[in-house]
Image: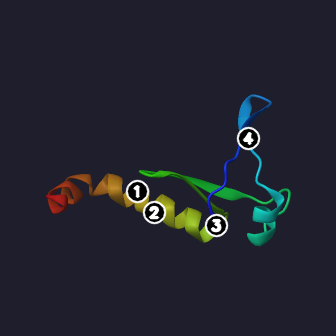
Amino acid sequence: MVREITLRKVGGSIGATLPKDMADRLHLEVGDRVLAVETDRGILLSPYDPDVEEGLALAAKAAATFRNALRELAK
């Protein structure tokens, strides 16, 4: 489902408000944490999961460590 969401100023940051029906479907409540992942297609929001966060950190470390090898494999 695609929905337009308006960004608002929240203190010194920018916040997005999810429509209630979307939050209900995704079982999100006030105070829940989500991960914001920048992709080549935009921003992906997904429910916070410590295991996913740890996996993303490990993948980033591996990508940095094996950058040259990954470049060669991408050819």
The span from disc 3 to disc 2 (Cα, nearest Å) is: 12 Å
Mark 4 crowd level (few <14, some 14–19, many ≥20, 10 Å Cα): few
The span from disc 2 to disc 1 (Cα, nearest Å) is: 5 Å
First reached walking from the N terminus: tag 4 or tag 3:
4
Quadrant that contains the N terminus: bottom right
Q: Name the residue under label 2.
A: 58
Mark 1 crowd level (few <14, some 14–19, many ≥20, 10 Å Cα): few
The span from disc 1 to disc 4 (Cα, nearest Å) is: 29 Å
Which of the two discs, 4 and 2, sits closer to the camera? 4
Query: The residue tagged with tag 4: helix, strand or loop?
Result: strand
First reached walking from the N terminus: tag 1 or tag 3:
3
The residue located at (19%, 59%) in the rendering is 74
Mark drawn on residue 48: none
Query: The residue tagged with tag 2: helix, strand or loop?
Result: helix
Labels 4 and 3 touching (C-beta < 8 A): no
Q: Mark 1 points at which residue?
A: 61
Mark 3 crowd level (few <14, some 14–19, many ≥20, 10 Å Cα): few
The span from disc 1 to disc 3 (Cα, nearest Å) is: 17 Å
- Circle 1: residue type: Lys
First reached walking from the N terminus: tag 1 or tag 4:
4
Q: Name the residue under label 3.
A: 50
- Circle 4: residue type: Gly
- Circle 3: residue type: Pro
Is 4 situated above or below 7?
below
Q: Mark 4 points at which residue?
A: 15
* Residue lying furthest top: 12
Residue 8: give x, y in percent of width and height: 75, 35
Query: The residue tagged with tag 3: helix, strand or loop?
Result: helix
18 sits left or right of 50 in the view: right
Mark 2 crowd level (few <14, some 14–19, many ≥20, 10 Å Cα): few
- Circle 2: residue type: Leu
